[in-house]
Amino acid sequence: MTRIINSAGKIKALNIRKEGPQDDKVLAIDVKFGDVSITPELLARLLGSDEETVLASFWDEARDPRFLALDPIGSMAELRHCRVTIERMRLDDCLVRKFKVALGSLNACRAEFSVTVNSPTSNVAAVLAELVAEDVGILVDMAQGELELAA
């Protein structure tokens, strides 16, 4: 596993639902995070590029965002089979997706993204509900080769 996010952020919303075939539905939770710091290297991976190209494209020599890059950058990339840790609560086999990244000075990236937790244990929803709108620690670890870029 490779650590790709190690930051604080905010849980903006929870969506609890059942998914799957009619006779075999399982519980799933979508957790929307905001204001999470990510690296330009991760942004490059999400865009299917390299860090040097992303740095030159989105920031000027003073490391301020270029004019065209002021709106959030969306990525349809999906990170599959991730281990996500939220305030010491470990969640395995998560899907991380729906990235929107805002650029700041000094090559800073602030991200918003969603994590889908499939078949959570009974107390996960209750614990996450208590954390909505709170600042939380977020770790995302990705298995090698599990980044999938949408066509």
Image (cartoon, helix red, strand yellow):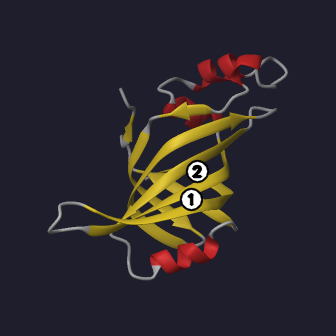
Name the residue nearer the viewer: 119 or 79.
119
Could you say where residue 65 lies in the image, as x and y percent from the top left? 77, 25
Residues at discs 1 and 2 in contact (Cβ within 8 Å): yes
Say which residue appears at 47% left-offset and 26% top-offset: 48
Please name the residue shown 76% across and 19% down the image.
Answer: 66
Direction from residue 84 to residue 94 in the image, left or right: left
Q: Secondary structure at mark 2?
A: strand
In the foreground, 105 or 99? 99
Compared across the picture, whether 137 is left or right of 24 comes to right
The residue tagged with tag 1: helix, strand or loop? Answer: strand
The image position of residue 78, as x and y in percent, is 41, 42
Q: Residue at x 38, y 65 (%)?
A: 17
Q: Residues within 10 Å of mark 1 (few under 14, many from 20)?
A: some
- In screen coordinates, is 30 left or right of 68? left
The residues tagged by marks 1 and 2 sit, at their Cα atoms, a distance apart of 5 Å
Where 41 falls versus 24 (above or below)?
above
First reached walking from the N terminus: tag 1 or tag 2: 2
Quadrant for residue 60, please give it.
top right
Q: Is residue 108 above or below residue 26?
A: above
The picture quadrant where one finds residue 21 is bottom left
| Mark sitting on residue 75 | none
Q: Which residue, as the protein is rendered here, is positioned at the far left?
A: 23
Image disc number at residue 139: 1
Give amino acid for label 1. Leu
In which quarter of the view is residue 82 placed?
A: bottom left
Q: Which residue is mark 2?
A: 5
The residue sitting at 77% across, 34% down in the picture is: 104
Q: In the picture provided, is 111 more to the left or to the right than 124?
A: right
Amino acid found under the numbered disc labelled 2: Ile
| Outermost right residue | 62
